[in-house]
Amino acid sequence: MKLILLLAFTSLAFAEETAGGEKDMTPWKWANFAILAAGIGYLLVKQAGPYFASRSVEIRKGIEDAQKQRADAEQRAAAMDARLANLGVEVEALRKSAREEAAQEGDRIRQETAREMAKIQANADREIASALKTAQIELKNYSAGLAIDLAREKVHRQMSPDDQETLVRNFMTDLSTS
């Protein structure tokens, strides 16, 4: 501040009058310029130095962060490239696994089908055997019924009323003795 006042008074001392009685303002203009330049210089030294220093630190930090992000992005890109490179291998492995699982499932289904067919065949054999036994029994009963009917007819044809009476008497005699 003292420097500014000193410059202002010095410029007054150098002020000269011109021919028309007017004072020459050139020294004042130079003094004004010097004051302005000194003020700006002072502000620049006082304010701009720390500002530029902090701004420089921020820029360096931003550059470091950007480099870290870039390195991280490059790592991720490299990892993705590696995964993409292995993608064909992984897809082939998945296909192979799917084929093996399908083959195993097919074998399991075939085995289960064979077991079910064996059960069905066993049930069918039992039903056929049962139906055959039933048919045999029915055939025996039918044959026995026919034999009895045939025997009855034969007995009726060959037996006379006298033979019937003799049979009834013998039957009654047998009943009374028993």
Image (cartoon, rainbow, N blue to C red):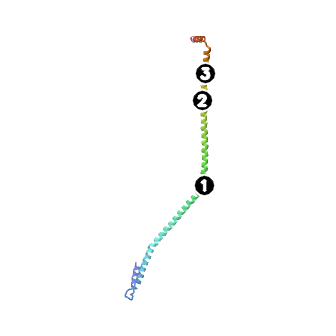
Amino acid of disc 2: Ala
In the displayed structure, 143 sits above or below 2; it is: above
Q: Which mark is residue 88?
A: 1
Task: Give the number of the mark in front: 3 or 1.
Answer: 3
3 or 2: tag closer to the N-terminus? 2
**Secondary structure at numbered mark 1:** helix
- At 43% across and 76% down in the image, what residue appears? 40
Mark 2 crowdedness (10 Å alpha carbons): few <14, some 14-19, many ≥20:
few
Residue bearing mark 3:
146
3 or 1: tag closer to the N-terminus? 1
Q: Residue 41: where, in percent of width, then height? A: 44, 76
- At 56% across and 60% down in the image, what residue appears? 77
Q: Quadrant of residue 108?
A: top right
Residue bearing mark 2:
131
Q: CA distance from mark 1 to mark 2?
A: 62 Å
Question: Of 116 and 61, which appears nearest the observer?
Answer: 116
Point out the image quarter for the N terminus: bottom left
